[in-house]
Amino acid sequence: MANIDALNATGAATASVAPRLSDGPRGPKPKSALSPRNIMLYGTLLIVSIYYLLPLYVMIVTSLKDMAEIRMGNVFSPPVDVTFQPWVKAWAEACTGVNCDGLSRGFWNSVRILIPSVLLSMTIALISGYTLSKWKFKGSEVFFTILLVGAFIPYQVMLYPIVIGLREVGGFMTDIYQGTCGLFTAAEGACRGRVQLFGSLSGLVIVHTIFGLPINVLLFRNYFASIPDELFKAARVDGAGFWGILIRIILPMSLPIIVVSGIIQVTGIWNDFLFGVVYTRAESYPMTVQLNNIVNSVQGIKEYNVNMAATLLTGLVPLVVYFFSGKLFVRGIAAGAVKG
Amino acid sequence: MAIAESGETTVTRRTAAAKKPIRLFRNLWSKIALTPMILTAVVVFMGGTIWTIVYSFTNSGLLPRLNWVGLDQYERLWSTAKWIVSIKNLAIYGVFSLTFTLVIGFVLAALLDRKIRFEDTFRTIFLYPFALSFIVTGLVWQWILNPEFGIQGIVRGWGWESFTFNPLNDPEIVMFGLLIAGLWQGTGLIMCIMLAGLRGIDEDIWKAARVDGIGVVKTYVQIIIPMMRPVFVTAVVLITSGIIKLYDLVVAQTAGGPGIASEVPAKYVMTTMFGGQNLGQGFAASTMMLLSVVIILIPWALLEFGGRKRG
Amino acid sequence: MTNNSVEIRDLDLHFGAVKVLQQLNLDIHEGEFLVLLGSSGCGKSTLLNCIAGLLEITDGQIWIKGENVTWAEPSQRGIGMVFQSYALYPQMTVRGNLSFGLRNARVPKDEIERRVSRAAEVLQIGPLLDRKPAALSGGQRQRVAIGRALVRDVDVFLFDEPLSNLDAKLRADLRVELKRLHNQLENTMIYVTHDQVEAMTLADRIAIMKGGKIMQLGTPDEIYNRPQNLYVADFIGSPSMNFIQGKVNGMTFTAGDLSMPLDGYQFSGPQTDGQTATIGIRPEHVITGELVANAPMRTTVNVDIVEPMGSDTLVWADLAGKPFRIRMDGQATVSHGDSLEIGLDLARSSLFDTQSELRL
C-alpha cells in the first residue's frame, strides 16, 4: 500500500530535490526579528537579490524609454516618458539584413520548431524510458549507457556529421519520393519536389529530438522504474501487451513527469542558439538567432531601447514557463543536473 | 473432457506454446520501440564522434575528404594564436567560474537554509536567470556594462571622472565581463542543488553539533560540507561541462572581441568549421574539446561508479 | 491423463552465471493448496513468476491442466495472480480493476458484469466497487486483488506473499478467509510465503525451498514431525529444534556422557555402525515435570534464562556446554540457576546423518 500511496501522492519523484525543498528549512530557530544575525542574513540576501534582479529591471526600463532619453540618462534611470514604440518596433519592424519584419518572424519560427520538437522528443523519450524500465532485453541497458555518455560529448564534435547525415537522409528520401510519386499522380512536374532536411525546420526538429533524448529518456526511465513491477506483472496476467500497458496503465500515471519533461524541453529548445545557427537558413532562424542578429548587427545606429525590448520578448516564453511551473521547474532542472 | 469440446484449438495452442520462440522476435515491440533511441546512441553519438575524430587526421577543407595528413591539423591548431588565446581564456574563465559558482551557490543555499521567511521568493529570484537563453543574458550584460550609459557612466556621472570599468572593451579583463554574466545565469542552479543537499542531511546532525557546542560556521565547514561530497562532485561536473560548452554567451556579449581577446574553443570550432571552410581544423579543435571532457569525466566516473560497485 | 493441475519438469533458470532454479520438478494436484516456503532469496517467488510466465525460463517445461504452457503468454495460461503490494491499477475504480483482464480478453459486457458482481459478493466488496484503490484500507485492497484473480475464472491461483504487507491481526483474519475461500472454490492454489505459520495453517502440502531447490515436499505434519534433512528441521518451528551431535553405535546414540537407546525410532534409511549423527529434538517435545519418570531417557540440565511468554515459557538451559531450548507451560516456575530434570523421547525426535545432513 505504501507503494501506491507514494505514487498517488508525489508522483514518485525522479529527482529527490523538489520534495526535499518542500521539507522546510533547517537550522536553529530564528530569534527576535531585528537581531544582528537577522539583519546580516536578510541584508545579504537583499543585496544579492538586487544583483539578480538588476538585469530584468534594466531590460524593462530601457525598453520603455525613447532614444533621446537613453542618451541623457543611464541604464538604471527609470523612464520619464513611457513609450511602447520600441516594443512595436522590435516585434514588427526591426531589421536583420534585408528583412525588416521584426522579431515576429523569429518568434513564429521558434514556435514552429518548438511544438513538433517537444512532441516528438517527448513521445520517443517516453516510449524508450518505458521500454528500458519495464521491457528490458539483452543489451538495452548498454544502448542506454551509450546514450547517457553521449550527453557529455561537446555538441561541436557531432555538428558536422549530423549536417552530412541530414543531407544524405534528405537526398535518400527525395529519391524515394521522386521514384514512387509517379505511381500516384500523372500530373506533369508533380514529382519535382525535394525532401529538404538540412537547412529546414524539419531538420532542426530532428536535431532537437536527438539531443533532447538523453535527459528525457533518463527522466522517464527513472520515473517508470519507481512504478512497482508488480503492477506491470498484474497487467500482463490480465492480458495487456506492450502498448496496452503503456496506454492504459502507465500513461495515466505519468502526468507529473510529462510536465517536468515538457518544461525542460520547452525552455531548452526555445533558448537554443547553436543548432539554430548551424542547421537553419536565414529565413527560418529561430528567435534567439534573429535576436542576436538584430542586436549585434554592425549597420546603422544602435537602438538600445529596441534591443532591450527584443531581448525581453525573447526571454518572455521561458520566463512565463518558469514563473508558472514553480517547483516542477526545480525538479526538472535538478533531474537535468544528473545529465549535465 | 475439455479436449472433446475444443480439441483442435488445444492442440494448436499446445504446439505454439511448447516451442521456444526465436530470441530476436520475443517481445518484438520493445525492440522496435527502442530503435530510435538505439539509432541516436549508436549512429549519431558514437558514429558521429568517431567520424569527427577520423576526419581530424585529414586535410578536409570546404568538404570532408579522406586525405590523411597525420597530426598536421593538431600541430597547426597548437601554433595558431587564436586557439592558444581561446584555451587561455577558457582556463581563466573556468577557474574563476568554478570557484565562484561553488562558493556563491553554497553560501546562498546555506543562507536560505537558516529558517528564513520568504525562502520561496528568494529562491525564485536567484533561479530565474537560469530559465533564460545565454543570448538574452549576454545582450543584457552587454548593455549594463556599456561604458557610456552603464556602470562606468553612472559612477563618472557621480563626479568620479577617472573611474574606469569597461570590461567588454578591455582585452585584459574581458573574460571577467563574461564571468559576471555567466555567474548571474548559472549560480541559481548550483544553489538549488546545494540546498537540496543541505536538506538531505539528517537534522540530528545539527542537534548533535549544538549539543557538542560547535558553532554554525564550524559545523558547516567541518561536518556539513564533508557530508555533501557527492553533491559537490555533481556540481563540479555540471559547472565544468557548462564551461567547456561556453559559446552562446560569448557570441552575444562580445562576439569574441575586442579583437580576439575573448575567443573560446567552442567558438573557434564554429568559425573554422562553418566560417573558415577549414573543416580539418574544426574537427581537430572539437576533438581537443572532447579530450578535455574525457579527462574531466573519467576520474569522476571512476569515483562515482567504481566506488559504488565496491561499496 | 493425470490429476495434476500444474506440472514442472526439469526447470532451470539462470541469470547469467547465477543458477536461480536448478533441475526443479514439482507436481501440484488438482484442487491442492500448495505453499512454497523459504527464506528470502531461495527462489520461491522466482518459481511462482516462472509458472505465471512473467519470467522466461532457461530450460524445462511447465504444464498447466495438461497443456504445455512453457512459452505461453501469462494471460494465456489460465492463471490468476495476487501480489504482495496488491498491484491495483491506481487510476481505475475497483470495478475497473476487476474487469480489466476480462475487457482485454473481449469478454461480453453482461458476462463481465455478472462475474464482477459474483466476485464482489464472495469477497464482500460490493459497496467498494466504485471507489479508487487509494480510498481503500490494506485489507480491502487485498480483497480486490484476490477478486481480480477470481473474476478470471481460472484453474490456478498464484499468491505471492499476499499477506506480508498487512498488520498482524489483519493477517490472521485474512488467512482464515483465504482458507475458507479455498474450501469454497476448490481451485488449485500456489502460495508463496516466508511465514511458517501461514504455511502450516493454509497448506495441503508445503514445499520448502533453499538455493533454487526443493528441500522437502510434504504435508505440514510430515514437514514438522519428519523433516527429511537438517535444513528443514532447523527452518521449521519456532523456537527452532535442538541439535545434539554424537554417534550411532548399534541401537544406541551416544553424545559425550549422554547415551540414548534407539529402540522406538523409525529409521527411514540404512545406518552404519559408528557413524556420526545428529539428533534433533523440538523444544516442545522435551518432557518435564511428573512425566519425566516415564521417559525412556532422562538427564539434568542447568537453567540459564527463562522467557515467560504467557501461554508458555521458553527455558534456555545448558546441556553438555551447549544451549538447549525447552518449552514449558505458562505456569512453570523455574528460574536462573535451577537444575531441571528433563526426559527425551526418541519417538518424537529426528536423527540425521551429520555428513549428508539427511534423515536416518
Image (cartoon, coloured by chain):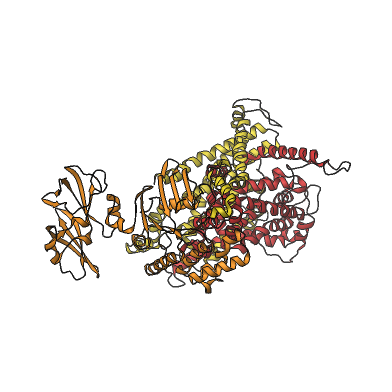
Chain colours: A red, B yellow, C orange
Q: A139 left or right of C8?
A: right
Residue at screen point 75% across, 58% down: A67
Identity of the residue furthest to the bottom in this view: C127
Please identify the quarter of the rendering in which residue B65 is found.
top right
Q: C69 left or right of A57?
A: left
On the image, the x and y values in percent for residue B269 come to 64, 38
Residue A225 appears anywhere in the view: yes
Please identify the quarter of the rendering in which residue B214 is found.
bottom left
Q: In this rendered view, identify the residue nearer to me: A188 or C206.
A: C206
Please identify the quarter of the rendering in which residue A247 is found.
bottom right
Q: B141 left or right of C276?
A: right
Number of marks in the image?
A: 0
In the image, residue C153 sits, relative to residue A201, either above or below, namely below
Residue C91 appears anywhere in the view: no
Q: In this rendered view, identify the residue nearer to me: C313 or A319.
A: C313
On the image, the x and y values in percent for residue A291 come to 72, 52
Identity of the residue furthest to the right in this view: A188
On the image, the x and y values in percent for residue C194 come to 37, 57
On the image, the x and y values in percent for residue B265 come to 60, 39
Residue at screen point 12% across, 51% down: C259
Q: In this rendered view, identify the residue nearer to me: B90 or B206.
A: B206
